[in-house]
Amino acid sequence: MRDAALEVVRVLQNANHVAYWAGGCVRDMLLGREPHDFDIATSARPDEVAALFRKTRLVGVQFGVVLVRTFGHSLEVATFRTDHSYEDGRRPTGVTFSTPEEDARRRDFTINGMFYDPVADEVHDFVHGRSDLKTGLIRAIGAAAERFAEDHLRVLRAIKFASRFGFAIEPATWEAMKESAADLRRISPERIRMELEAMLSRPGRDVAARMLADCGAIDHLWTGSWALHSIMPRITTALGALPDSASFEQALALLLVGYQPKLAVQACRELRSSNESTDRVEWLISHQHTFDAPDALTLADLKLLMADAGFAELVAYVAALHCADARPTALVDSIRRRAEAIPQKDVAPKPLVNGDDLEQLGIAKGPIYKKVLDAVYYAQLNGELTTREAALDRAQSLARNPESGQ
Ligand code: ATP
Ligand code: MG
């Protein structure tokens, strides 16, 4: 991708255009981190860009963005521009093509506002991004209050970058964030969720949560989210105890840990989380007490949990909660040990008895089937039934007397 990004710059420069790498990739490079994508900014107009490359697609004509496909990578090439006024605090009403310096000034934070010429190996820094990068500061470009009023989402972006890099937020920027926090209500829930996802999916998630609370943003993330303030210390401790690789869902389930599962689902829906993501969060929250009394958890209970793809996440989730609540680690440790001792093939073995067998036994079809099959399978998982004969016997007697339980 780096080579592709270099090649695109070369082609543009050879055609007498100014072309640089821009924004996040310059920041990452200067931090010694591998950028995950390269954006290119150029003096060439979209039609000029399109004429220079074989495979292009206009992705944001109104913003002058062309997607160039080369060396198997897609790169965004954007014409230097100035954004017109933001009337709704969400998106600019239009753009004018302009100079590199003006293009730098429309960007959000100084560390995100630099250009790099990979051919000449030169950084072009119109916004003092380099010094803020050295000190570790998130600072709005220009007048902070205006910049957050233009686009309220920047409040969350500031927290995302601060928590990702372990940076502080410059005081005037921080004050402006506090003033704009309530305007987050006007931002689309999808965009809010995407920023939350970005900050909660990596280490530093505890720092992010604390900043969300301290600047007041947490009050405006979903209906009723202000209530999180009172349990913030518990949540941030738990977030800090999650493994680095923890998922968005594990972290969100910690934020929502005080909610009834139904209300947690409502919050996820409000954030426009996918069904799958919402289900994960709900599952974690509704199982948060599962390991409170490990001895009460039968072998079958444990296997049924282990058969769920989210089991490892649940263990880490509960361990983080126990850490926040200063509960003994022995509780979760004992579960981990018991789970490790169960061979994979025994977690979800084929049932000894199925519906056809019940039919063969002459049991009349009905809701009883599920009841009997579940009970027999549970006994099988528990190691009480090891042969098909025994399982059929059990099914027979259960069908006759469903309340017998044995
Ligand atoms: P990441 O590593 O998360 O992708 P990034 O800095 O590349 O971080 P993007 O959201 O990909 O962030 O945006 C690319 C660049 O566009 C930013 O570095 C910044 O210069 C500019 N930018 C993005 N969003 C905004 C915004 N809301 N307001 C102003 N400038 C923005
Ligand atoms: Mg990016």
Image (tube, rainbow, N blue to C red):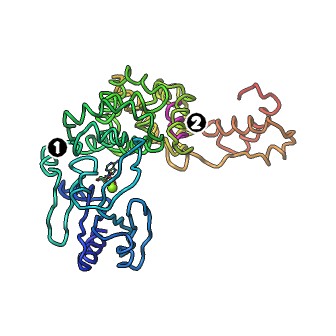
Chief secondary structure of the magenta span? helix
- Span highlighted in magenta in the image: 276-286
Instruction: Point out residue 302 in the picture as x, y percentages from the top left corner.
Output: 53, 36
Q: Nearer the viewer, residue 27 or 85?
A: 85
Rendered-image quarter of ligand 2 = bottom left
Q: Secondary structure at mark 1?
A: loop
Q: Please tell me in which quadrant of the rendered image residue 208 appears.
A: top left
State the quadrant of the N terminus.
bottom left
Disc number lying in front (1 or 2): 1
Q: Look at 55% across and 31% down and name the residue there.
A: 298
Quadrant for the C terminus, please: top right
Residue 404 figure quarter: top right
- Please name the amino acid that badge 1 sits on: Gly
Q: Which residue, given by chain and number where applicable, does mark 2 sit on? A: 300
Specify whether residue 399 is painted magenta.
no
Rate crowding at label 2 as few (under 14), some (14 to 19) or many (20 or more) other CA atoms within 10 Å: some
Query: Which is nearer the eye, 374 or 96?
Result: 96
Where residue 263 appears, as percent x and y from the top left, is 54, 28
Between 398 and 218, which is closer to the camera in this rendering? 218
Residue at 22% of width from left, 46% of height from top?
141
Measured as percent of width and height from the top left, residue 154 is found at 33, 42
* In the image, residue 354 above or below residue 236: below
| Amino acid type, mark 2 | Ala
Distance from label 1 to label 2 (Cα)?
Answer: 51 Å
Report the residue marked by disc 1.
136
Residue at horizontal 74%, vertical 34%? 371
Q: Residue at x 39, y 43 (%)?
A: 195
Neighbour class for label 1 at 10 Å: few (<14), some, many (≥20)? some
Q: Seen in the image, is 78 located left or right of residue 266?
A: left
Position of 103 relative to 381 (above/below): below
Residue 73 visible to the viewer: yes
Q: Nearer the viewer, residue 273 or 380?
A: 273
